[in-house]
Image (tube, helix red, strand yellow):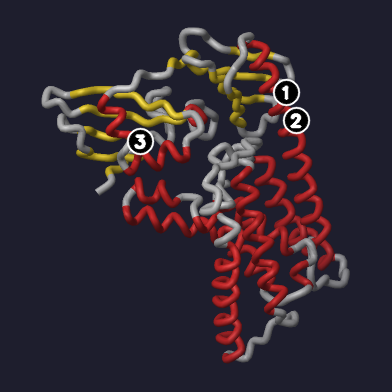
Amino acid sequence: MEPVTHFMTGAVLSRTGLNRKAAYATLAMTLAAEAPDIDTLWSLGGPVVGFEHHRGITHTFLGLPFEAAIIVGGIWLFHRWRGSRGKPPLAPVRWGLLYLFCLIALLSHILLDWTNNYGVRPFFPFNPRWYAGSIVFIFEPVMFLALLLALIAPFFFGLINSEVGAKKERFRGQGWAIFALALIVSLWTWRSVERDNAISLARIEVGAPSLRVFADPYPTNPYLWNVIAETPDAYRIFTVNALRGEAVSSPERDTIYKPPTTLATLAAKRSLLGRVYLDWSMFPIVEQTGIDQDGYATVTFRDLRFMYDTFLTRGRSIGRDHPPLTGTVTVDPDRKIAEMEMSGRIQK
């Protein structure tokens, strides 16, 4: 998920009553809920290195205990600083509970990332497999608004209560937080059912047995899906409306044949970008897309899961030739890697 949803999830989790158990619970859980994305710092080493480590060790069950310890350690330093200024916390400090709450928030990050089509590999390095629930888009407006409401509604109702002279609650918003989280779980359940329906509709439309079928979510509308069906020699892409029972596909535009293997594509697959991309991609399209007069070949890496537009991503991709997360490798005449590029950025 995008960062703001992660942050808000941590804050809402703390308001379910955990913030009454230990001081700094809301601060700790809000930070922990987004902490695994610290792996974006790997992009300082270049786009391919950043892509290699994205949703890597910081998004694993092995890494979470260390991340929780770092967050609690940081809050301990903050607590010491506040104490030196004569500002004690409002609730008792229970460091063991705070560590446990950080783990809960960190787990929420992995869970939310699993719900997207990009996927996570929580058992890495023991199991390198990627898992993707693919039930909600990377930004889901319904989830976002539910979390936002849970955070701001208690404030506005507190203003109303203060106007009528009601006693001010020390910890507000527990009911709103529980309601928002229950709504999100209900949304996930609903979307899971509709995703299965969309896959079934696509299977019927294909007719012949398919090797794999995968559905990508659209934001907001739980009935609308982008479905990929793999056959031995090609992929069929469908726009499925599960409510109407429709699976629409153009045989010319929505049939993507598996590209042939060339010497250039073989060399590109052995590059750093190629190895990382093929390790992550579920539906890779690797093809030689050009060769210049000096014999330098361009090999393009695309993933079918991202070759569709939504109202949030339209314009970021240029048709299906350059969808998000497109990589290119330039291979010289001697089959050596001359250049690697990821999402428009060159690896130096």
Percent position of residue 307, x then y: 48, 27
Classify mark 1: helix, strand or loop: helix
In the depicted structure, whether residue 338 falls above or below residue 12: above
Tell me the kind of residue under disc 1.
Asn
Badge number at residue 100: none
Classify mark 3: helix, strand or loop: strand
Residue at the spot of label 2: 193
Give the CA distance from mark 1 to mark 3: 32 Å
Q: Is residue 236 found left or right of 11 in the rendered image?
A: left
Task: Verify CB contact (< 8 Å) between mark 2 and mark 1.
Answer: yes
Residue at the spot of label 3: 327
**Residue 197 is drawn in which quadrant?**
top right
Tell me the kind of residue under disc 2.
Val
Tell me the kind of residue under disc 3.
Gly
Percent position of residue 68, x then y: 60, 68
Residue at figure coordinates x 80%, y 59% from the top left:
157
User: Mark 1, residues whose alpha carbon is within 10 Å: few (<14), some, or many (≥20)?
Assistant: some
Classify mark 2: helix, strand or loop: helix
Give the CA distance from mark 2 to mark 3: 33 Å
Residue at figure coordinates x 72%, y 51% from the top left:
149
Give the CA distance from mark 2 to mark 1: 6 Å
Between discs 1 and 3, the one toward the N terminus:
1
In the depicted structure, whether residue 335 falls above or below residue 150: above
Q: Is residue 316 found left or right of 87 in the rendered image?
A: left
Q: Nearer the viewer, residue 283 or 238?
A: 283
Residue at figure coordinates x 56%, y 55% from the top left:
60
Q: Is residue 315 something that shows in the picture?
A: no
Between discs 2 and 3, the one toward the N terminus:
2
Badge number at residue 197: 1
Q: Is residue 234 found left or right of 247 in the rendered image?
A: left
Q: Nearer the viewer, residue 167 or 22?
A: 22
